[in-house]
Amino acid sequence: MSAKIIDGKAIANDIRAEVARGVEKLKRERGVTPGLATVLVGDNPASHKYVSMKRKACAEAGIESYHYELPKTVAPEEVLALVRKLGADRGVHGILVQLPLPFDDRPVLEAVPLSKDVDGFHPLNIGALAMKGREPDFAPCTPAGVIELLDRSGTRIAGADAVVLGRSNIVGMPVALLLVARDATVTVCHSKTRSIEEVCRRADILVAAIGRARFVKGSWVKPGATVIDVGTNMIEDPKATGGKRLVGDVDFEAASQVAGRITPVPGGVGPMTIAMLLRNTLRSAERS
Ligand code: GUN
């Protein structure tokens, strides 16, 4: 069997077009322009690239972005003061502090008002995800993108056996909570999990977010399962331009022979993170 490829780029483009229409309507009907503040500390090249992609996507959707760049030597208090100032600014509907920070990120993430936490990283937003009868103001973008890919690819979540590989704050744990909220039966695997391949083979939905190149083998995939690969790992490849190539946490060639649906890397989950950030920013402006 050969899996249907879930085209994250096309789905993300659909969502970005939906957001652009929503932004247009908000401007027309209420004269409100959604605004996203981006805070970037230090000179991590990947962080610079991500933030510039986010700002470009904002511009394309009609969202204003306000950018703040601080040196890696900045005092944490200065970043805190900036985030508090942005929290009080009525033109700013979302605040994104790009991680990692060169110091403890917790006080900074907690200084973001819940109503502007479009990244969904505030512990109270994550906590609300874990509680019955509560909803976070915003779900974290990559996990929300995973759910969106399942929904838009026609994968049934309710009642499914879902396995999440990884338990990070940014992806694994919130994905697991979102799947539970959608009535999946969820197993979270990590470095101490025994017989991980057997656990994976029971999964109707397999989400890989462990950051290990091509860790999930084709033989671990249940025939017909939906496989969502969140991994972004650079590996050496003499044939690739620059000698390096991006691969996921799943052995795509082998897994796509067994799965029913699968996301590629690149072009699967990656583009969804930005699409969900734009959607969260629009929602925040609509609520303002
Ligand atoms: N660092 C890695 N992923 C993310 C993300 O989704 N948002 C922010 N702010 N930082 C990140």
Image (tube, grey):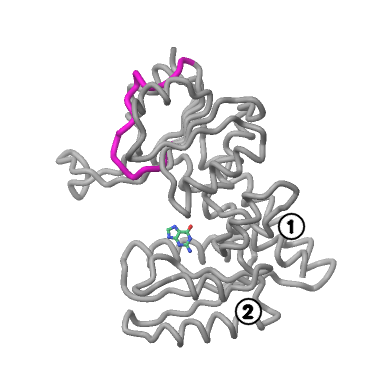
Local secondary structure at mark 1: helix
Amino acid type at circle 1 is Gly
The location of residue 253, given as percent across then percent down, is 33, 25
Up-down: is 84 above or below 193? below
- In which quadrant will I find the C terminus? bottom right
Asked if residue 92 is positioned above or below residue 283 in the image, the reply reads below
- Give the amino acid at mark 2: Gly
Residue sitting at x 34%, y 75%: 42
Query: Looking at the rendering, which quadrant does residue 153 occupy?
Result: top right
Image side of residue 3 versus residue 13, left or right: left
For disc 2, does the CB lie below 8 Å from ligand 1? no
Residue 28: quarter of image: bottom right
| First to last magenta residue range | 208-223
Percent position of residue 216, x then y = 34, 30
Q: Which residue is mark 2?
A: 87
The residue that appears at 64% across and 73% down in the rendered structure is 113
Examine the rendered structure and indicate whether residue 160 appears above or below residue 43.
above
Q: Is residue 142 left or right of residue 118?
A: left
Report the label total.
Answer: 2
- Residue at horizontal 42 percent and vertical 82 percent from the top: 76
Q: Which mark is drawn over residue 22? A: 1
Query: x%, y% of residue 142?
Result: 52, 49
Q: Residue at x 63, y 79 (%)?
A: 87
Q: Quadrant of the N terminus?
A: top left
Q: Nearer the viewer, residue 113 or 246?
A: 113
- Indicate the secondary structure of the residue bearing disc 2: helix
